[in-house]
Image (cartoon, coloured by chain):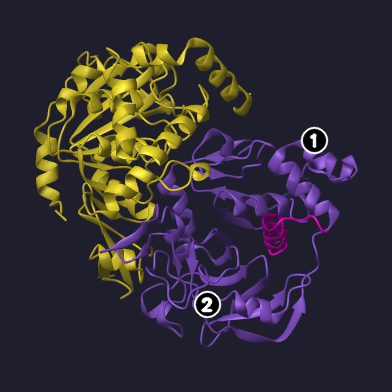
Amino acid sequence: MEHVAVLAARAEREATGRSSVDKRMTAEAAVQLIRDGDHVAIGGTLYSRTPMALVFALLRQRRRHLTVSRPLACYEIELFLSTGALDRIVSSWVGIGLPWGLAPIFRHYVERGEVAYDEWSHLAMGLRYKAGAMGVPFLPTLTMLGSDLAARLDLQTVTCPYTGERLAAVPALNPDVALIHAHRADMLGNVQVDGYQHMDVDMARAARTVIVSAEQIVSPDEIAARPDRTMLPHFAVDAVVAAPYGAYPHECYGRYGPDLRHFDGYAAAAKEHGPAAGLRYVEENVDAHADFAGFLASAGAVRLAALGADAGELIPR
Amino acid sequence: MTDVTSEELMAITASRLLADHKVVFAGVGMPLLASAVARHRHAPHLTIVLEGGIIGTTLLPGKLPISTNEMRAAYGAQMLTDITDIFLYAQRGYFDYGFLGAAQVDMYGNINTSVIGTMERPRVRLPGSGGANDIISLCNEVLIVTQHEPRRFVERVDFITSPGYLSGGDSRARAGLVTGRLGAVVTDLALLDFEPASRRMRLRALQPGVSVGQVRAQTGFELLLGDEITELTPPSPEEVAIYRELRDGPAAGQAAGVAEPDRVAAGPA
């Protein structure tokens, strides 16, 4: 594992620009900020607020030798695997979701040793991003101690200089790029979300480059009307992409529920055909369309509206 | 009740272990159902916490979440925070119970949800820890609920994803795991705990109609026996109705034949 020196991470951040400029661009343009070999952190968790419009744009590029990290990863991991994009997964859990059983394409690659899976605990993932966001090289914690997870990762311990107690030292993670999907952003990159924050704030602040897609691009005045909802300030964001239904077929809190039927179709194909099904999914749902709007059109307005109604039933009024 | 499924039996048995005015950190599936049953029956002030960052969820009957991070999991919640933060509440000592399932569990309560076989040559690569490692490390008392079968109850887990009492005795504390303890293991055959000195799994009570021999036959290691092995009370019609209504919606509670005021629709206090 490559460890992060405080001053190196900080010097890099000091040197980057913080201009208040219009950062709007297309998803296709935004993912040009990602290079072969990069570590890409994907926001949201499992099938909630996944930046799917950005993920699809990245899949289309067929980047190579990527590392992807996520708190809990869903089938987007299998799409990266099936297209040969991944060398390494960093996560605490990789699957599709409980009803669909084990993820067959993930199993195919990891069991053959064709991709590395660094398995951390969920809190350790969070603390790794948090240490990166805080600009410190590690955080002490009482989790992961004594487990084979810790042994396999060669996790080190520290002794408290005040009490002499021993704690796990979870190393900082500073991804090259973070992909985040939000409810609202202005053109400068001030970002607001409703509901769950997942690990998005720490993930973004830890990253070297931050790409945000948003359900809605709003005016700076609308952001300022509810400043308490802003989770990332403009100077922590590099690109802003307008992406209504940008987490579909995953859910976006308060906006639309997950399209579980879509998952059913994917999971059945993956079970039967393995990586070939993952590649075919990308060809049919990503490559076949000019952009994410094309994919949404193939799902149909009726289906999207129904998912919106599902969400409406669940949020507080 | 003759038509109770093993899932219902486990969830209802586990629900009885949760006291009122406590905080439980539950995973989706059986732990969440058990916690919800407790809240709707004997523990109306039980606060359910989920790792998506949710505190005090009440759940919509028939629309239980399948992920702790989806909107359904937050229905009626008192607070939403981020994921890392929810685990930091656990590390601070706020969570009375942590509630886990297990693909494999051994005689010291170590849990494996990472790999069947070895990491070098996995026969099956499982999804991984998720929050399980943190829950068993940081919650005040941990409850494990799982089907009782030899392939799950093994002498030694293939991989310690989530540390129980490690190799027994004081090995957990020596590893630096100074917080938390393992309470009960609930299965479709029995209720078990851990003997205080050796920290080995011990049989305490049997599900109705189950024998000690049956439990032994389904356990892949030598079980310690409690001084007195009692029989658990079977699930009541009320408990089954609450469980089914939570899982399947109001119509299911009605079908179980329990009058309206005793069902979930009446709601917690």
Distance from disc 2 to disc 1, alpha carbons, whole Å, reads: 41 Å
Picture quarter containing residue B6? bottom right
Residue under numbered circle 2: B220
Count neighbours of disc 2 (C-alpha within 10 A) and say few if under 14, some if 14 to 19, many if 20 or more: some
Which range of residues does the magenta coloring cover? B1-18
Q: Secondary structure at mark 2?
A: loop
Q: Is residue A96 left or right of residue A286?
A: right
Percent position of residue A317, x then y: 63, 23
- Position above or below: A41 against A115: above
Circle 1 chain: B
On screen, residue A182 above or below A218? below
**Mark number for residue B251?**
1
- The amino acid sitting under disc 2 is Gly
Whether residue A190 appears in this view of the structure is: no
A239 to the left or right of A261? left
For chain B, what colour was chosen? purple
Q: Tell which residue pokes out farthest to the front in this image.
A: A272
Q: Dot 1: what SS?
A: helix
The percent position of residue A148, horizontal first and vertical second, equals 33, 68
- Disc 1 packing (10 Å; few <14; some 14–19; many ≥20): few
Residue extending furthest right? B259
Residue at 51% across / 23% down in the picture? A256
Q: Give the quadrant of residue B193.
A: bottom right
Residue A157, percent across and down?
26, 69
Chain A's colour?
A: yellow
